[in-house]
Amino acid sequence: MEFGRELIDIRSRYGLSQEDVARALNVSRTTVGEIEKGRRDIGLTELDALAQLIESDVLTIITAGGEGVSGRMKLREMIIKIAESYARQAGKDIPKTFLAKLVYLIDFAWFYRQLEPMSGLAYRRLSYGPVADGYFATLGELVDQGHLNARQGRNAQWYSLVGDDTLPVNGEHLSVAECELIDEVVGKWKDASTSEIVEFTHRQLPWQICAPGEVIPYELITQEEPDRVF
């Protein structure tokens, strides 16, 4: 199931459909769906074909989001806490892309202040801004497990917490100080549009310096002016 989630994330990251992956792996679309649901293993030959499709290598795919389980668990709590904070401060559901940008800004702002990331996950330079490896898969996981609601709007997908599924101030993986920073960053952007927050991240040094698809070093954020961090 773990690799199935990783495959979903790879498809989302590279804009691939199940049909695209099926053709590259020489399997049916149904088979790709079975792999993503954890009902079928992926063979080494198929894994190699997937690596070629995304111009990567097998080791990188296997260790994608390889910052470990703790990083993914931290990302889960960050997403839930952001959704809770945004609902409380903005009074509405949060768009998918907007949420991705907040995750990035919070992670890099924590590095700016503490010289260590909040999640430790890798962020890549995508066309619509930096996105954490595992972000799309983690969102899907939270929806499947009943922690988040997802609804499709006219131009975006929106997310909200299910019931009172909020985190304590000091969660299992988030400290009090980290929760406070999340509230601070959300408070800064609660009245902004998705296009505004995307434009902001596009003007930042980390996004401008890195090549498309490249992992963005956290250290680049330290070269920004304080008011340009988030």
Image: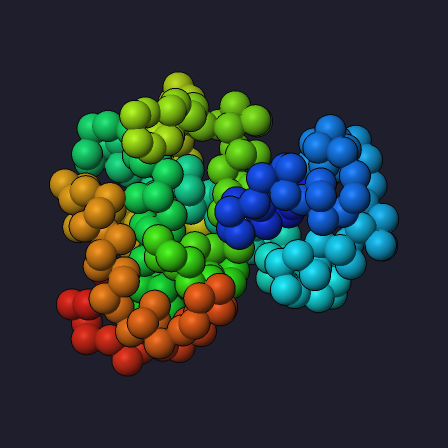
Q: Quadrant of the N terminus?
A: top right
Frontmost residue, 113 versus 60:
60
In this rendering, the answer to whether 106 lies above or below 193 is below
In this rendering, the answer to whether 40 lies above or below 214 is above
How many marks the image carries: the answer is: 0
Q: Quadrant of residue 108?
A: bottom left
In the rendered image, is residue 140 in sight?
Answer: yes
Frontmost residue, 101 versus 148:
101
Image position, residue 83 (x, y; %): 34, 36
Image position, residue 124 (x, y; %): 46, 62
Image position, residue 134 (x, y; %): 55, 50
Measuring 53% from the left and 52% from the top, which residue is drawn there? 14
Q: Quadrant of the C terminus?
A: bottom left
Query: Is 16 placed left or right of 155 in the picture?
Result: right
Query: Is 130 placed left or right of 113 in the picture?
Result: right
Image position, residue 196 (x, y; %): 18, 50
Q: Quadrant of residue 205?
A: bottom left
Measuring 66% from the left and 56% from the top, which residue is drawn there? 53
| Colouring method of the image | rainbow
Q: Quadrant of residue 193?
A: top left
Most extreme residue toward the bottom is 223
Measuring 19% from the left and 72% from the top, which residue is drawn there? 226
In the rendered image, is residue 118 in sight?
Answer: no
Measuring 31% from the left and 72% from the top, which residue is drawn there? 208
